[in-house]
Amino acid sequence: MNKLLILLCIIVMILSCKRDLIKDGILMAEREAPIGFNHLRVFRDSTFEFEYKSFPNSKLHSGKMKIVNDTIIFEYSDSIPAFGNKAIIDGNKLIYTNGKYSEILEIWLDSISD
């Protein structure tokens, strides 16, 4: 019985954390890969987090962003990643356009375009 109660408490805590993340987020986009993923979270206060995970590497980029029409310009707190600092919202895709390579993420939460 105690194990079931502990398990239920853990599930409730995890679900409430995700709900708070979505509640404060205005844009969420990601791309999954066989051994990792890229995940972008943009928040109401114009801050963002871009999480890059690939075995064995992991990196979290953060900073501020601004929106100009359909373009998001990211101002990173640290160095600019190889995929660049500008992305275009194109339907349900977020396409980074000015890096060494093009990064395309699928948008699953978009309060910006509403």
Image (spheres, helix red, strand yellow):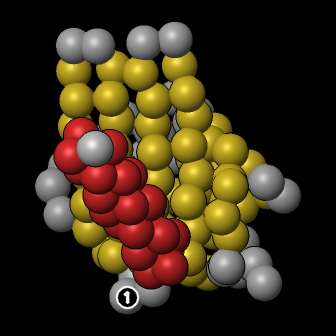
Q: Residue furthest front?
A: 1
Q: Would residue 76 be seen by someone viewing this image from the given angle?
A: no
Q: Residue at x 18, y 63 (%)?
A: 77
**Where does label 1 land, which residue?**
45
Rendered image quadrant of residue 41: bottom left
Q: Is residue 7 left or right of residue 87?
A: left
Q: Nearer the viewer, residue 1 or 17?
A: 1
Where's residue 67, x and y in %? 56, 80
Q: Which of the image's four quarters has the N terminus?
A: top left
Where's residue 5, x and y in %? 29, 52
Q: Residue at x 57, y 68 (%)?
A: 27
- Vertical position of residue 10 compared to residue 114: above or below: above
10 Å crowding of disc 1: few (<14), some (14-19), many (20+): few
Residue at disc 1, secondary structure: loop
Q: Residue at x 67, y 79 (%)?
A: 111
Q: Residue at x 41, y 21 (%)?
A: 36
Q: Residue furthest right?
A: 91
Q: Which of the image's four quarters has the C terminus?
A: bottom right
Rendered image quadrant of residue 62: bottom left
Q: Is residue 57 left or right of residue 47?
A: left
Where's residue 64, x and y in %? 32, 75
Q: Residue furthest left?
A: 78
- Vertical position of residue 66 compared to residue 4: above or below: below
Q: Nearer the viewer, residue 24 or 98?
A: 24
Q: Nearer the viewer, residue 84 or 103?
A: 103
Where's residue 91, x and y in %? 84, 58
Question: What's the residue type where badge 1 is placed?
Answer: Asp
Q: Would residue 9 be seen by someone viewing this image from the given angle?
A: yes
Q: Nearer the viewer, residue 40 or 73?
A: 40
